[in-house]
Amino acid sequence: MCALCGLSGESSAHLFISCPVVSSIWYSVSYWLGWEFVSPRDLLGHFEAFVGLGADRKARNIFSLVWLAVVWSIWKSRNDVIFSGRPFSVDVLVDRAKRSSWIWFSEVGPSSRSGGVRCSGSWWCIGVVGVLA
Ligand SMILES: [Zn+2]
């Protein structure tokens, strides 16, 4: 049984995409990124559609990193619920994904995949779109 909604079995597609709790996470992330996202039902299709919204290689690299950070945060939060009994919070999870993606992004370095982008973590959390401009 899904630990987040308690309504369905826990498949990877349900946990990371179609769970009603997780849907609101992707909505918040899409809002943060500045676009609307219609979610495919399978995990690979979801990743490809999400990353494919990037207009160029730099944007696709950043969206790929954000997608991985969101999925990682969902997994961590799911484990916190199951193994530590911590309450689940969409806002906390989205903040965790933002912070993780910023840390990962800044560790990539300006000379490699980030394409020379420099910005602060607070700017990142306000909106990745500013980084892409
Ligand atoms: Zn669920």
Image (tube, rainbow, N blue to C red):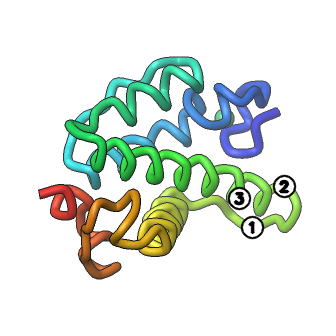
Measure the C-alpha gap from mark 1 to mark 3.
11 Å
What label sits on residue 29 in the rendered view?
Answer: none
User: In the rendered image, is residue 91 in sight?
Assistant: no
Please give the name of the residue rendered at 30% of the width and 42% of the height, measured from the top-left corner. Answer: 57
Q: Report ligand 1 position as a quadrant.
A: top right
Coordinates of residue 106 in the picture (x, y in percent): 42, 74
Q: Does 118 sit above or below residue 55?
A: below
User: In the rendered image, is residue 31 in sight?
Assistant: yes
Mark 1 nearby-residue class (10 Å; few <14, some 14–19, many ≥20): few
Give, as a three-letter code, the residue at label 2: Ile
In which quadrant will I find the C terminus? bottom left
The residue carrying mark 1 is: 86
Judged from the image, the secondary structure of the residue bearing numbered disc 3 is: helix
Coordinates of residue 69 in the picture (x, y in percent): 54, 55
What label sits on residue 82 in the rendered view?
Answer: 2
Task: Work out whether mark 1 precedes mark 3 in sequence or the reverse, and give the earlier one.
Answer: 3
Occupied quadrant, residue 55 = top left
Please give the name of the residue rendered at 54% of the width and 41% of the height, measured from the top-left corner. Answer: 22
Give, as a three-letter code, the residue at label 3: Lys
Task: Work out whether mark 2 precedes mark 3 in sequence or the reverse, and give the earlier one.
Answer: 3
Q: Does 12 sit above or below residue 107?
A: above
The residue carrying mark 3 is: 76
Coordinates of residue 41 in the picture (x, y in percent): 53, 18
